Amino acid sequence: MGYRRDLALLRGGSTATRLLPIRLLGRLAHRVGRLIAPRLGGTAALERNLRVVGTNDPAKAARRGIGGYASYWVDTLRLPSLPDRVTDRRFSFIGYHHILDVQRAGKTPIMVLPHLGSWEWAAAWLGRIGDQKVVAVVERLEPEQVFEWFEQTRESYGVEVVPLGTDAMRRLVAIATDRSAIICLVADRDIAGNGQTVSFFGQEASLPGGPALLSLRTGSPLLPVAIYDTGSTRECVVCPPLWPERQGKLRDDVARMTQDVARALEPLIAAAPDQWHVLSDIWPAEAS
């Protein structure tokens, strides 16, 4: 069956990543990703996205983005067996005090981030080194056995997985009452197709309204975050919190706050566009 083949590949890949140093694995994955990029269906969409962002050479940046995406997969497969001292040594934070400030204020940080670099590394550091309770909403994969494998992999380095779906908001609202938790939400792609229309890099795009809704319902702020691959390390940049404020109707406040998220993500992506790897169109093809 297909899922057995997929599971065998994932397990085999996880075992194979233990045979080489993590730095060398990252380099190899990046090189392989750039080589196979022209044959991947998502590369053309990434190139169109990067054209809107404004890179000098969108085609080259897209190939590098696919290379970064390959490195992300290596990190995902390798992190469960990576010693804590290596996880700590190869990771750094800028702005970590923003997370602590929110927690000291008695609220749960809601981290909103783009598909950039390796957020898995940040999650592993927070869960294993920072002694934080990390909760992440992820897209449910098919078949179920593959999704369960990823769930178990992430749980091995301290991440509680909440599948994207109709029950996700209820669960997150409950989790936000736990002051020891950190919630992580990828916010630059409208997977469900029911997001908010915002201005994103000067053009209309649909971004998920869930982060803003969760913030407004719970009083917990959104912290824009990006994780960059610096070659020798992964570096997480945490921006100042966006505190929720009710100004009118809930739907209007959600729209306003989602626009604030879009505005905050723009400089984080623009700082390293060739590490961004959204493999589906953010903007209508004719706009890009």
Image (tube, grey):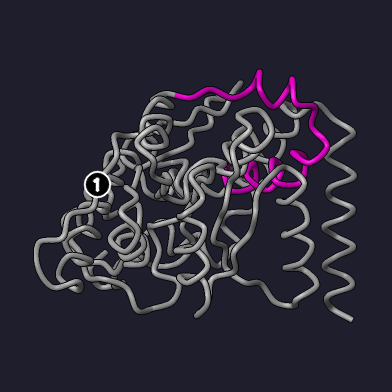
At 74% from the left and 20% from the top, the residue drawn is 85
Is residue 180 covered in magenta?
no
Residue 50: x %, y % from top left: 35, 52
At 39% from the left and 57% from the top, the residue drawn is 187
The answer to whether residue 30 is above or below residue 13 is: above
The answer to whether residue 4 is above or below residue 218 is: below
Q: Residue furthest left?
A: 248
Taking 72 as reference, is 189 left or right? left
Mark 1 neighbour density, 10 Å: few (under 14) some (14–19) many (20 or more): some
At 63% from the left and 32% from the top, the residue drawn is 131
Q: Amino acid at mark 1?
A: Trp
Most frequent secondary structure within the magenta stretch: helix
Q: Which residues are magenta?
A: 68-93
The answer to whether residue 24 is above or below residue 155 is: above
At 26% from the left and 67% from the top, the residue drawn is 205
Residue 185: x %, y % from top left: 46, 55
Nearer to us in this view, 271 or 55: 271
The answer to whether residue 75 is above or below residue 8 is: above
Quarter residue 192 falls in: bottom left
Nearer to us in this view, 32 or 167: 167
* Tally of numbered tags: 1
Is residue 88 covered in magenta?
yes
Taking 183 as reference, is 281 left or right? left
Taking 103 as reference, is 121 left or right? right
Residue hosting label 1: 243
Taking 123 as reference, is 84 left or right? right
Which quadrant, please, contains the C terminus?
Answer: bottom left
Residue 95: x %, y % from top left: 38, 25
